[in-house]
Amino acid sequence: MYCVSCQVLIPEANHIIRNGSFPVYRDYTGLKLETFKRNWHQQYGQDYTSDGRAVDFATVFGVLFSGVTGIMAGANMSGDYMCFAFFFGGGGGERLGKQSLKKH
């Protein structure tokens, strides 16, 4: 779904924005240059997932770093097993399955 400007429902767990039982919606602009410019500089605020504590650079960096490195690791490994039978020979998958089910 591609939307130019959509309304997104704020989760009920977000007690910083939601104040009561009425649903609250906010704008989702998608990829726009003006949104990118507005969000370019740091604007750390409270985070409802951490009991309202303010987010700092270390928190943002930790989330982005682990996400990006995980994606890159997966992309680098994606071609390792293109020819599974060549790397593990006949019955290699069966041997790997039996090894993983063995009790240690």
Image: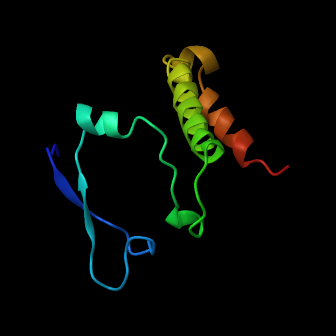
Identify the image's colour scheme: rainbow, by chain, secondary structure or one colour.
rainbow
* Residue 83 x %, y %: 50, 16
Residue at horizontal 32 percent and vertical 35 percent from the top? 36
Q: Residue furthest right?
A: 104
Residue at horizontal 16 percent and vertical 49 percent from the top? 5
* Residue 41 x %, y %: 45, 37
Residue at horizontal 16 percent and vertical 43 percent from the top? 2
**Total count of labels:** 0
Q: Against 31, is 14 above or below? A: below
Q: Nearer the viewer, residue 34 or 90?
A: 34
Q: Against 79, is 12 above or below? A: below
Q: Look at the image and tell me whether residue 100 can be seen.
A: yes
Q: Against 6, is 22 above or below? A: below
Would you say 23 lies left or right of 87 here? left
* Residue 79 x %, y %: 50, 18
Would you say 29 lies left or right of 41 here? left
Q: Look at the image and tell me whether residue 84 can be seen.
A: no
Q: Residue furthest bottom?
A: 21
Q: Against 47, is 31 above or below? A: above
Q: Residue furthest top?
A: 86
Residue at horizontal 24 percent and vertical 35 percent from the top? 34
Which quadrant of the figure has residue 10? bottom left
Would you say 5 lies left or right of 50 here? left
Would you say 104 lies left or right of 19 here? right
* Residue 91 x %, y %: 61, 28
